[in-house]
Image (cartoon, helix red, strand yellow):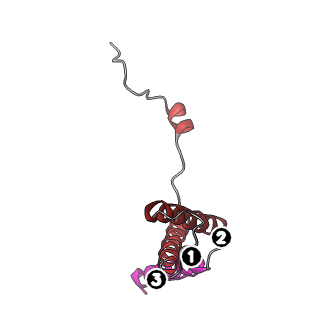
Amino acid sequence: MITQGLPTLNPVAQAQGAQALPDADEKTEKAARQFEGLLMGLLFQTMRKTVQPSGLFGDSGQSRSTYEYLMDQAVVDRAVTTGHGWGLADRLKAAWTQAEKSGHEKELPRG
């Protein structure tokens, strides 16, 4: 008797639906880009507090701050995804990769 609702055990079907796991370089790249985006967003928010409102996004405090936040996020997202940020992500990735390599070298026994 076959129970309905159970997944098939067909290896071909499983292989076709499988997705490749991201390798360490992709994870490092993504983490570095996200960190750069986080810092850019925080800096934009801090800088925005020092500027007098222009009235472009309205006079209401809440609606203006929402639109400004969304605009800042769009700029940050675009810069980070296209790789035209500050270059911090590239430096972080290089530093993390170097630290990982030197960490593996220390673990290897000499002999």
Q: Looking at the rendering, in which quadrant would you find the N terminus?
A: top left
Q: Which numbered disc covers residue 83?
A: 2
Which quadrant of the figure contains the C terminus? Answer: bottom left
Q: Provide the residue designation for mark 3.
A: 105
Residue 1 drawn above or below residue 21 = above
The chief SS type of the magenta part is: helix
- Residue type at tag 3: Glu
Q: CA distance from mark 3 to mark 1?
A: 24 Å
Q: Is residue 66 magenta?
A: no
Q: Left or right of 52: which side holds 84? A: right
**SS class, disc 3:** helix
Residue sitting nearer the eye, 79 or 101: 79
Contact? badges 2 and 1 (CB < 8 Å): yes
Identify the image quadrant of residue 57: bottom right
SS label for mark 1? helix
Which residue, given by chain and number where applicable, does mark 1 sit on? 89
- Mark in front: 3 vs 1: 1
Kind of residue at disc 1: Ala
Q: Residues within 10 Å of mark 3 (few under 14, many from 20)?
A: few
Question: Alpha carbon of mark 3 to alpha carbon of mark 2: how far?
Answer: 31 Å
Mark in the foreground, 3 or 2: 2
Which comes sooner in the sequence, label 3 or label 1?
1
Is residue 31 depicted above or below 3 in this figure? below
Q: Which residues are magenta?
A: 87-111
- What residue type is disc 2 on? Gly
